[in-house]
Image: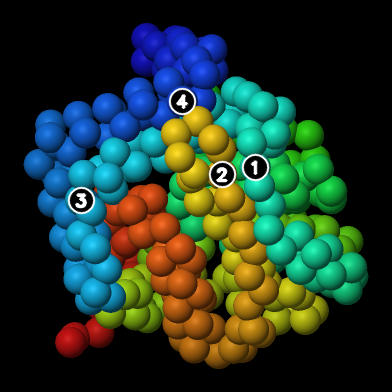
Amino acid sequence: MRKPLLKLSLNVIAALPLTVAQVLGACLGILAYVGSKQYRGLFRPQYEAVVRSRNLPFKLWPAIRASGMLFSDSLWIWRNPEKALALVEVQNWDLVEAAISEGHGLVMLTPHLGGFEIIPRVLAQHFPATILYRPSRQAWLNEVVEEGRAYPNMHFVPTNLHGVRQMTRALTRGEAIGILPDQVPSGGEGVWVPFFGRPAYTTPLPARLANRNNTPVVMFTAKRKVLGQGWLMQATRLSPLSEDATLGAAELNLAIENAVLVAPEQFIWSYNRYKHPAGAELPPKA
């Protein structure tokens, strides 16, 4: 029953103009915040701690609305990729072309911010992209997500040894790979390093893959413009990440912080970035 309802929701959002879809998303963000104590307990402390520590304006309700738009943007992009591509303003594309032209592939990092789902579709217009993703524990939801994300020249692989091997092969062919670097890895696959001043279990995978063959690493963001006007996609090439797992992960988190600060209200603050995954060592004491 849930799968047909979700598919119906996807189709409804797909049929809406982007402006209406984003307004609907904003309403869903407000409902989630008001209706869920757990959601509020994650969202506000994480968001408030970051903006206070950086002396940024505290815009709680715009951030709450934007959290729902992150969801509606993703669904709308899945169902309307060509329309979405027409609404993307891309900056620093010459930087991306220069990186891929080096012939060692490209490590593409895309935090959960704004219209992040449009980023691999932009790259897929120019070269193949293999994207690492974590399958849902619920088969029906995983099927819906895979159907929504499917797009020519984009190949999704799971977060396991097989997926990592496929990404290594893609880099060997000089292609791009994509990683969502702000997700908490499974226990035993990460290291504890600071993220906005708190220990966060972080994947060293981007540094490890990049250092195999001197592969360029580029951080992408897709900041949402005003309602219905699309997204501003920006690219920043990172300095080579350390071969030391802990140092490389710390450098990665610093780069993610800089990406989040491009549009702090549009980040996924409802996600528990500081959780302790089963099987991981305890975080360091303050």
Residue annotated with mark 1: 88
Mark 1 Cα-neighbour bin, 10 Å: few <14, some 14–19, many ≥20: many
Give the CA distance from mark 4 to mark 2: 12 Å
Query: Residue 281: image x %, image y %?
Result: 30, 76
What residue sits right under mark 3 in the picture?
60
Question: Could you tell me which residue is drawn at 27 percent across and 68 percent down?
Answer: 56
Cα–Cα gap, marks 3 and 2: 21 Å
Across the whole image, how many numbered discs are drawn on residues?
4
Query: Which amino acid lies under the numbered mark 3 shown in the image of this protein?
Result: Leu
State which tag comes first along the sequence, 4 or 2.
4
Real-space Cα separation, disc 2 to disc 1, in angstroms: 5 Å
For residue 19, which numbered disc appears in the image? 4
Q: Quadrant of the N terminus?
A: top left
Q: Residue, x 84% and y 70% (percent of image)?
A: 98
Q: Residue at image x 38%, y 53%?
A: 267
Q: Residue furthest left?
A: 37
Q: Are marks 1 and 4 in contact (CB under 8 Å)?
A: no
Q: Earlier in the sequence, mark 2 or mark 1?
A: 1
Residue 27 in the image: x percent, y percent? Answer: 27, 27
Of mark 3 and mark 4, the one earlier in the sequence is 4
**Residue type, label 4:** Thr
Q: Is 59 placed left or right of 179 in the picture?
A: left
Give the residue pinned by disc 2.
231
What type is the residue that disc 1 sits on? Answer: Val
Against 263, is 6 above or below?
Answer: above
Colouring method of the image: rainbow
Whether residue 278 is visible, yes or no, is: no
**How far is disc 1 from disc 4 in space, using C-alphas?**
15 Å
**Quick check: 230 above or below 60?**
above
